[in-house]
Image (cartoon, coloured by chain):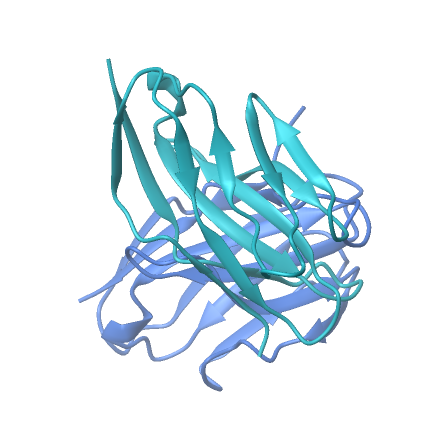
Amino acid sequence: GAGVSQSPRYKVAKRGQDVALRCDPISGHVSLFWYQQALGQGPEFLTYFQNEAQLDKSGLPSDRFFAERPEGSVSTLKIQRTQQEDSAVYLCASSLGQAPNSPLHFGNGTRLTVT
Amino acid sequence: GDSVTQMEGPVTLSEEAFLTINCTYTATGYPSLFWYVQYPGEGLQLLLKATKADDKGSNKGFEATYRKETTSFHLEKGSVQVSDSAVYFCALSVGNNNDMRFGAGTRLTVKP
């Protein structure tokens, strides 16, 4: 079946531009997560949704980062006024239920390069 | 805060060699522990997990035992194959929200 789909696969933005990254989770998955993965590092938690409710946004690095999941399915991570330090792979993951018996399913990520 | 520390790589082994990738954790509660693997060009996928002390997770010949006394969850495989070449991430979650904390990853290369 279809896995977690992220688009675009690659994004190059000039410093100061706004970007929007899309995540299509597996159908029926309640939980959705965004992670940021810098080169050579593990994923760092950004934010978590349960259905349409954003239950945890403690990992968002600044108020330039905003995520939404208005209908409890597709999610968008928006970064305003991008900076070079925002360059990373942004991973989306979804799960059917709650930890620990419901594994996370990851997308292939969006590689953002800010020039 | 809750975190995991894993052995730095890269690790290069010959086929059929024994593999150990060390992982230790710090957590205030009672975490569940995971190993995720990322094959070249693919997304992260769950390799194995353990949810309580002394549990052993296993999959595809890999094993890891949840050791509370040493706060460790080391990944082992008795005989690696070229197809095991990937980046391996140790992770933990605490509570019910599936919030995962990942280690930095260890890149494994297996040569024929």
In this view, the residue farthest toward the bottom is A63
Q: Is residue A70 visible?
A: no
Q: Colour of chain A?
A: blue
In this view, the residue farthest toward the left is A115
Note whether A91 is above or below B42 in the view shown.
below
Residue drawn 42% across the image and 43% down it: B21
Measuring from the top left, give residue A24's x and y in whole percent: 61, 45
Q: Colour of chain B?
A: cyan
Left/right placement of residue A74 relative to residue B74 reads right
Residue drawn 48% across the image and 53% down it: B23
Q: In this view of the protein, which residue sits in the foreground, A102 or B50?
A: B50
Q: In this view of the protein, which residue sits in the foreground, A19 or B63?
A: B63
Note whether A19 is above or below A2 in the view shown.
below
Note whether B2 is above or below A110 in the view shown.
below
Measuring from the top left, give residue A21's x and y in whole percent: 47, 58
**Quarter residue B27 falls in:** bottom right
Q: Is residue A40 visible?
A: yes
Image quadrant holding the C terminus of chain B, namely: top left
Residue drawn 75% across the image and 39% down it: A27
Left/right placement of residue B5 relative to residue A30 reads left
Residue drawn 33% across the image and 17% down it: B82
Q: How many numbered marks, from 0 up?
A: 0
Measuring from the top left, give residue A95's x and y in whole percent: 72, 47
Image quadrant holding the N terminus of chain B, namely: bottom right
**Quarter residue B5 falls in:** bottom left
